Each structure stands twice: as structure tokens, then as C-alpha cells.
């Protein structure tokens, strides 16, 4: 299946993406994880992306589209993939559609994880992430088994610099202006499914599986 995950920062996209990709055996493509990896390795792409990310702003469409299309050309994406955090603008959505069209493919579904703004600040302030494998935790709602360590790979988990409240508010504004129009974009194409993201992590996953027809 070819899936796009949509939703505001902190909606639970990364958390659900891990479970969905395990269940469906498809690659998880997170633009945020890709950028953070480049930043931790100090590549020129990372240095460029960091300027925008630290301010809570979007990385340029040009750079973002380039890294995603390169990734989608990999053999492991031929039978399916899950995009998490891309597209975030209408320009990116159009670029994705054109690319898939030339490959004779199309998206199966866009899952919008719907969470009101009131939930977001609490989720973001307690978020901890693993830079090695991309796993996301929450000190209250989803703590790791051993404090400060990733359950999956054992690396240290950290607080993201762009998760401080001021930057989160900027990211929410940008989501409203630039990303929310994609809800209509995908609804008009008839491939939007809305998932209530305010429920517990497991319940959100169960609902996603139902929508995907994989609730066995
Ligand atoms: P979150 O899951 O908290 O919304 P991400 O990890 O997806 O955050 O992204 C972190 C940051 O990386 C974004 O705030 C933005 O600066 C940059 N970024 C990620 N995906 C994109 C994209 N598709 N277009 C532009 N910038 C992006
Ligand atoms: P996104 O990728 O959309 O920015 P994450 O998956 O990183 O979001 O989740 C943001 C934070 O909220 C993390 O700390 C995560 O553990 C927590 N979280 C995710 N889903 C839920 C949920 N359904 N209920 C409570 N907390 C959640
Ligand atoms: Zn890890």
C-alpha cells in the first residue's frame, strides 16, 4: 500500500507510522528523520535544513522534494511505502502526484490524524526521540522501559530543540497556513480518511487498521 500520513506536529504520526509499517511490511519514510540524520552527520544538506528546522519553519520545497523522490526511487518502495511528514505543502503534493504518475502508480490512502491544538503542547513538551532509529516516546503517555534509553535500539533518547513551546507554536501556525490545505486536496481526490488522534496510542492504531482493512 502507498500511504500518506497527515496531521499537525505532535498528532502521533511517527508513533503510528512505526506500527503501521511493521504490520504492512512497508518502508517508513519520515522527512523529519531524514533531516535529523543529516544534521547529526553534519552534511551540507543537514546544515541547510537546520537553519529552517530550528526556527520551526519548513525546509524549502526544492530540497525536500529532491530527497523524497530520490528515496522513492529505491527498489524497496515499489510495492508500497508510508510517507510521514511529506507532503507538507501543495507544491510538494503536486510533485509527489507527478512522480507517481510517471511511475504508473498512485496513492491508496491519506490518513489524517486529527488532534485539536489543546493536546499538542503537552504532547510536544513530553516528547523524547531516538536519533538512531527515529522512535518517539512520551515521558507520561508512552515512557521507555529504561529511563532515557530507546526500547528498540538502546540509544539515548533526547528532547528535540524544536519542541520548545515557542517553536511548536510557530510550527502550528505553519501547519495551518501551508499544510492544512492538503486536507481538502486529498478529500477532493476521494482518498482522505480521518482518524481521531485523541485516543490512546493503541486505540488510534486499531482504528487505522480498520480503515486500512488490516484489523485481523
Ligand atoms: P513533527 O512530526 O513534529 O511535525 P517532523 O519530524 O516531521 O516534525 O519535522 C521536523 C521539521 O523538519 C519540520 O518542522 C520542518 O522544519 C522539517 N520538515 C519535515 N518535513 C518537511 C517537509 N515535508 N517540508 C518541509 N520541511 C519539512
Ligand atoms: P508526530 O510525528 O505527529 O509529530 P509523535 O508520534 O512524535 O508525533 O507524537 C508526539 C508525542 O505525543 C510523542 O511524545 C508521543 O509519544 C506522544 N503521543 C503520540 N500519540 C499519542 C496518543 N495517542 N496519546 C498520547 N500521546 C501520544
Ligand atoms: Zn532507537
Image (cartoon, grey):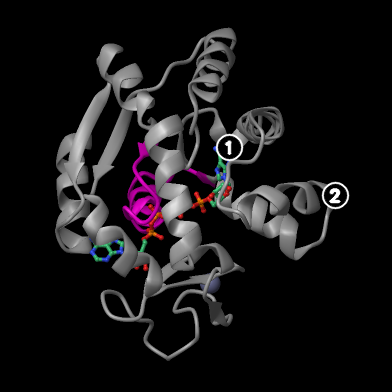
- Residue farthest along the bottom direction in this orientation: 146
Residue 216 appears anywhere in the view? no
Looking at the picture, does residue 148 appear above or below residue 189? Answer: below
Q: Is residue 14 magenta?
A: yes
Q: Position of residue 44 (x, y in %)?
A: 85, 49
Magenta-colored span: 4-29
Residue 135 appears anywhere in the view? yes
Upstream in sequence: badge 1 or badge 2: 2
Q: Position of residue 209 (x, y in %)?
A: 20, 44
Residue for point 65% across, 35% down: 64
* Gap in angstroms between the C-alphas marked 1 and 2: 26 Å
Foreground: 149 or 214? 149
Please identify the quadrant where the N terminus is shown. top left
Foreground: 47 or 150? 47
| Nearer to us: label 1 or label 2 | 2
Query: Residue 76's mark?
Result: 1
Image side of residue 161 versus residue 169, left or right:
right
Residue for point 37% across, 37% down: 176
Disc 2 within 8 angstroms of ligand 1 (CB): no
Query: Residue 119's mark?
Result: none
Query: Residue 44's mark?
Result: 2
Which element carries disc 2, helix, strand or loop? helix
Task: Answer few, some or many: residues within 10 Å of disc 1's Cα (few below 14, many 20 plus, some between 14 and 19).
Answer: few
Which element carries disc 1, helix, strand or loop? helix
Looking at the picture, does residue 199 appear above or below residue 87? Answer: below
Task: Answer few, some or many: residues within 10 Å of disc 2's Cα (few below 14, many 20 plus, some between 14 and 19).
Answer: few
Amino acid at each position: 500500500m502507498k500511504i500518506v500520513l497527515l496531521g499537525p506536529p505532535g498528532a502521533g504520526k511517527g508513533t503510528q507510522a512505526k506500527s503501521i509499517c511493521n504490520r504492512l511490511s512497508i518502508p517508513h519514510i519520515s522527512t523529519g528523520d531524514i533531516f535529523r540524520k543529516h544534521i547529526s552527520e553534519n552534511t551540507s544538506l543537514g546544515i541547510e535544513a537546520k537553519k529552517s528546522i530550528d526556527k520551526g519553519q519548513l525546509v524549502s520545497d526544492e530540497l525536500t522534494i529532491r530527497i523524497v523522490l530520490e528515496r522513492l526511487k529505491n527498489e524497496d518502495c515499489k510495492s508500497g511505502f508510508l510517507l510521514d511528514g511529506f507532503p507538507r505543502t501543495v507544491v510538494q503534493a503536486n510533485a509527489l502526484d507527478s512522480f507517481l504518475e510517471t511511475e504508473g502508480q498512485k496513492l491508496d490512502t491519506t490518513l489524517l490524524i486529527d488532534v485539536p491544538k489543546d493536546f499538542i503542547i503537552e504532547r510536544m513538551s513530553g516528547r523524547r526521540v531516538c536519533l538512531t532509529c527515529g522512535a518517539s516516546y512520551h515521558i507520561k503517555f508512552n515512557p521507555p522501559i529504561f529511563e532515557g534509553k530507546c526500547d528498540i535500539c538502546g540509544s539515548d533518547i533526547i528532547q528535540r530543540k524544536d519542541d520548545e513551546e515557542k517553536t511548536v507554536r510557530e510550527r502550528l501556525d505553519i501547519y495551518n497556513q501551508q499544510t492544512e490545505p492538503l486536507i481538502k486536496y486529498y478529500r477532493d481526490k476521494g482518498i482522505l480518511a480521518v482518524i481521531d488522534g485523541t485516543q490512546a496510542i493503541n486505540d488510534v492504531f486499531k482504528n487505522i487498521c480498520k480503515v486500512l482493512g488490516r484489523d485481523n
